[in-house]
Image: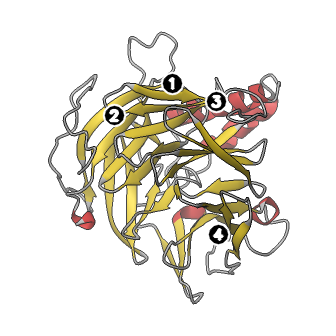
Amino acid sequence: MSGHVRAFHSWSSPPPAVRVTPWDRGIFAPEFISTAAVPLSESEEVTLLADEGTACVIDSYEGQVRCVAAEGTVVGVFGREGEGPGEFGDPAYLARGEAGTVGVVDSDLGRFTVFEPSGAWVSDVMLPDVFQPFPSFGAAVSGVSLDYMVMLGRMSGSLMTRYDVDLASGEVLGQEESPPGPWDIECGQVIHGIPDPAEGWAFVACEGHLIFVGGAGDATVLRAPMYVPELPDERDVARREEELLALNRSQGFPRTPAIDEALESYRATPKHYYLSAGEQLFDAANRYWIATQRDQHEWSYLDVYENAAYVGSVRVRDRLRAFDLLGSTLVVLVDRPVGPDDADGIPDRALDWYDIADLPFAR
């Protein structure tokens, strides 16, 4: 594979076994390739660029994007606060370009900016409101815009709309509303979805449910086979507390009683099946990958579906926060366990590369 980085190894502790090993219920360990440290950030966006050996993340504290090579070297750091070319109000989402470029969605400015990995500005274009891009883009950038009133149950209709925006002119080339349902789910709540590149949509819903809708509107509703209702443990609660405190800090608020109330509710509520609404994608073979909240301490798991059927899980080490796929390369953004050398009690963050070519369902 061009640009493969199999030779680079840099672990602070022994890596997982390098051969593919199936065990209970179709769980597989891919071959580890390499790792690279990245800064702490409240953002959990990651994009893998076209050379398969470079990935980018958002550094929310500096308002920048950082691109690193798999062996750990920094390829480029770019962006600063502002409204001019190459500047950000709030860099929120990343996407990879066909020619090794990286696209950044600025949620404050409603703008999509294209950069070289080194940080050289290429172009920018305005976007529809609340736009979340697909993992990759070419002459046009495609993504979905979420209707929060529908999501919150305050009105009926389509949860989201797909847009295709021409990068040269900013013209909306295509627009498609997601199917509105209803679907037969007892708990009733559909959370988020993504279009299937072939046709149709895939949605995550409450209590471990997934909905796969075909191009003709036919729907397969299933409960994820690997989902088991699981209450958060104290490590999960501590993570949630930090997220809520960070949200308050970003808005200039101190800790409030509402945070303690939210944490009590969180403790008593089974965790979602999905890690976060945006951590799902279709790979080049049209398989659906979703990051889960299963375990998430020593190991994390990605579940894979093909033709609306579960085909297996991929196990990676440490606490998975986000992921991307390109060819036979999987890159995951992880939090490392807090160790005796972490005086601040905050986990280090890293990007880990894996080779998934030998997974049984990837052949």
Spatial CA distance of label 3 from label 2 is: 22 Å
Q: Is residue 234 above or below residue 94?
A: above
Q: Amino acid at mark 3?
A: Gly
Q: Residue at x 61, y 32 (%)?
A: 42
Observer-nearest of 232 and 320 = 320
Residue projecting furthest to the left = 19
Indicate which disc residue 279 carries.
none
Q: Nearer the observer, disc 1 or disc 4?
A: 1
Q: Amino acid at mark 4?
A: Cys
Q: Residue at x 52, y 63 (%)?
A: 208
Q: Secondary structure at mark 1?
A: loop
Q: Amino acid at mark 1?
A: Pro
Q: Residue at x 57, y 50 (%)?
A: 276
Q: Secondary structure at mark 3?
A: loop
Spatial CA distance of label 1 from label 4 is: 39 Å
The residue to which callout 1 is attached is: 39
The residue to which callout 4 is attached is: 187
The residue to which callout 3 is attached is: 79
Q: Nearer the observer, disc 2 or disc 1?
A: 2
Q: Nearer the observer, disc 4 or disc 3?
A: 3
The residue to which callout 2 is attached is: 70
Q: Position of residue 88 (x, y in %)?
A: 71, 34
